[in-house]
Image (tube, rainbow, N blue to C red):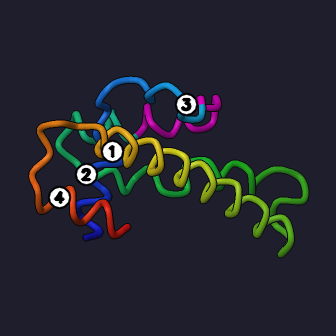
Amino acid sequence: MLELLAALMLNPAGPPPEGASARTPRTAALQSCVDTEFGAGRDGSACIGRLSGPCQDAAGGSTTPGMIACLAAEEADWRELMDAALVRAAADQDLEPDARRALARS
């Protein structure tokens, strides 16, 4: 299931459909990283921490509350990408029935 979600999230299948949240500059940067990684045949894991790392290097970011805030912000960015990918996948008329059922359970 994790592989399915990763593939859906990281597939740049066009803009989010109407009604989906607009990407922030942070999520756009994250998507760009993932697209680059996938284009090079890699799994995109190099993008994990891409946004929270610099945040933690900034003033106050190395404190426990700062680290929590930085990691929470990156988690929200990943969630936005995943949610948009799930909406696109659910709207895909060519989606196989097993995949459609898996999406319905998520």
For label 2, the residue is 7
Side of 103 where 61 appears, left or right: right
Give the residue type that dot 3 points to. Answer: Gly
Q: Which mark is residue 19?
A: 3
Q: Which residue is mark 1?
A: 10
| Element carrying mark 1 | helix
Q: Of label 2 and label 4, which has the lower sequence position?
A: 2
State the residue position of label 4. Answer: 99
Q: Amino acid at mark 2?
A: Ala
Q: CA–CA distance between discs 2 and 3?
A: 22 Å
Contact, mark 2 vs mark 3 (Cβ under 8 Å) = no
Which class describes the residues within 10 Å of circle 2: few (<14), some (14-19), or many (20+)? Answer: some
For this rendering, which residue is in front, 106 or 24? 106
Q: CA distance from mark 1 to mark 4?
A: 16 Å
Residue 71 image position (x, y, % from top left): 67, 63
User: Which amino acid, by three-letter code, is at mark 4?
Assistant: Ala
Measuring from the top left, give residue 4's x and y in whole percent: 23, 60
Residue at image point 32% right, 32% down: 12
Give the left or right position of residue 96, taking residue 80 as reference.
left
